[in-house]
Amino acid sequence: MSDSFRTIKEPIEDIIFKESGSKFINYAYPVDSEDDVEFYLSQLYEKWPDATHHCYAYIIGIDGKKFRANDDGEPGGSAGLPIYNQILSNEITNVLIVSVRYYGGTKLGIPGLVKAYKYAAQVVLEEAKIVEKFVTKRVKMVFSYDQQGIVERNVDRMEGEIIDKHFSDKCMFTISVRESKMDDFIRQFDEYYQMEIKIID
């Protein structure tokens, strides 16, 4: 299985359209966990507390097995599922799409709702930049000060990312490494430089 996936680069917010008097306010967020999903949903519930519906769908993970489609009171399958299907059709993951609806007095019917929520996901994704990312793991490395240059050069060469640095009697770096390169990364520092290295997630 490939360790690369497509997702959106950054949040897209407040993309609005109206249908038969109802207003749909649409959002897309890059997410890495269900905690991220809950964070963004809570923000939107707080921002639009009197909205008629907060319908959403998300997919997380390279295999797409972690997902949810929520109709939030709309007829079953008329809101969350059309949003979810747009995520699928764009072949992206680690994405949350939310459509906040203010009812305008005219019922859309189930076909109309499906069309509206499908369009909600389409318009917000049209504004998003799709990027390729990689599944990564983090390692913690401990080494002497005179080895810092070696570490930084090799992390850069293997397309890793230093995400935290701590200095005391020794250097301690937290580094994000592409999963498919992890074995080579560890072997390089453990065998050639005898550095202390540990996978932390």
Image: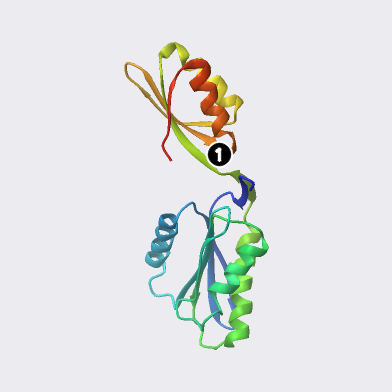
Above-or-below relation of 129 to 119: above
Residue beneath the point at 52% across and 67% down: 57
Give the residue type that dot 1 points to: Glu
- Quarter holding residue 188: top right
- State the SS at label 1: helix
Q: Disc 1 designates what residue?
A: 179
Residue 81: percent from left, percent from top: 57, 73
Specify whether residue 79 is in view: yes
Q: Position of residue 181 (x, y in %)?
A: 58, 34
Residue sitting at x 51%, y 84%: 75
User: Image quarter for residue 122?
Assistant: bottom right
Nearer to the camera, 19 or 129 = 129
31 up-or-down from 186: above or below: below
Q: Is residue 97 visible?
A: no
Q: Nearer the viewer, residue 177 or 105?
A: 177
Q: Residues within 10 Å of mark 1 (few under 14, many from 20)?
A: some
